[in-house]
Image (spheres, grey):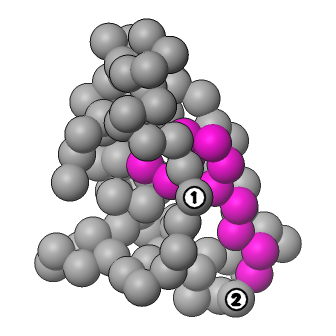
Amino acid sequence: MEDYDAVYFPGGHGLMEDLCVNADAGRLLTAALASGKPLAVVCHAPAVMLATRVHGVSPFKGYRVTAFTNDEEEAVGLASRLGGCWRTN
């Protein structure tokens, strides 16, 4: 993180395919949070926070997050296009 000023994960359905279980993404988010530097996770990107659950607990536990809900995906007819991260608990 010392080489970066911030971390930004853009939204979109593409990241729903595999980033929620990507260990590198999880480590990057965890390091960014610990650094105190700006961290932006936009649109569908909060799904990437699932990758931070080392030993079952995310460093984001207790944070308030706003993102698309499963119901919203179903309402607009896009739920079938989502990858493996959709409905991951």
**Label 2: which residue?**
36
Residue stretch rendered in magenta on the structure: 37-47
| Quarter of the image where the C terminus is located | bottom left
**Residue beneath the point at 44% across and 51% down:** 48
Q: In which quarter of the image is residue 50?
A: bottom left
Secondary structure at badge 1 equals loop
What type is the residue that disc 2 sits on?
Answer: Gly
Q: Compare residues 75 and 39 and report the one nearer the observer.
A: 75
What type is the residue that disc 1 sits on?
Answer: Thr
Mark 2 crowd level (few <14, some 14–19, many ≥20, 10 Å Cα): few
Q: Compare residues 35 and 78 and report the one nearer the observer.
A: 78
Relative horizontal placement of residue 39, taking residue 33 as reference (left or right) = right
Give the image location of residue 81, x and y in percent.
39, 12
Mark 1 crowd level (few <14, some 14–19, many ≥20, 10 Å Cα): few
Give the image location of residue 70, x and y in percent.
36, 36
Tell me, yes or no, whether the highlighted magenta stretch contains residue 15.
no
Secondary structure at badge 2 equals loop
